[in-house]
Amino acid sequence: MVRITGPPIHLARLGQEEIAMTKGENKFGGITPKGYPEPTEPEPDIEQIEEWVIDSVVDATDGCRVEPDGVCPHGYPSWLVYLGYI
């Protein structure tokens, strides 16, 4: 068994190359691994995410209001999509 310690990482698959990056790091020049623009709003805490799930309306990463699995007209995904919950 292998045990991994350290900061949480996110894996992105770009073509045949896998890239591991620590949370908050951006090695893609302002574009996240999923191809979305870099968030303009601070990341929500878990309490805010819980409220959004109950309301079925969430904030996009730029502050627009969208459906939980939506993307705003400016191309920013909901925080649930961006963080990988959906």
Image (cartoon, rainbow, N blue to C red):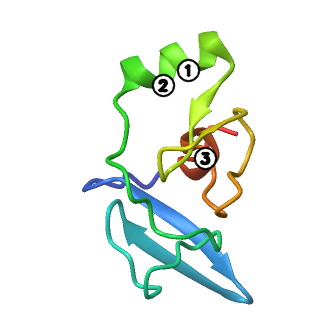
Report helix, strand or loop for mark 2: helix
Q: Indicate which disc residue 84 carries.
A: 3
At numbered mark 3, what does the secondary structure look like: helix, strand or loop? Answer: loop
Q: In 3D space, how far apart are the residues under numbered discs 2 and 3 (Cα atoms)? A: 12 Å
Q: Element at badge 1?
A: helix
Residue in front for this viewpoint, 77 or 2 = 77
Upstream in sequence: badge 3 or badge 1: 1
Quarter of the picture containing the C terminus is top right
Q: Amino acid at mark 2?
A: Ile
Q: Do residues under tags 1 and 2 come within 8 Å of each other at their CB atoms?
A: yes
Horizontal relation, residue 13 to residue 82: left or right: right
Q: Which mark is residue 49?
A: 2
Q: Which dot marks residue 52? A: 1
**Badge 3 amino acid:** Gly
Q: Which circle, 3 or 1, is nearer the viewer?
A: 1
Which residue is found at the position 61% from the left and 68% from the top? 36
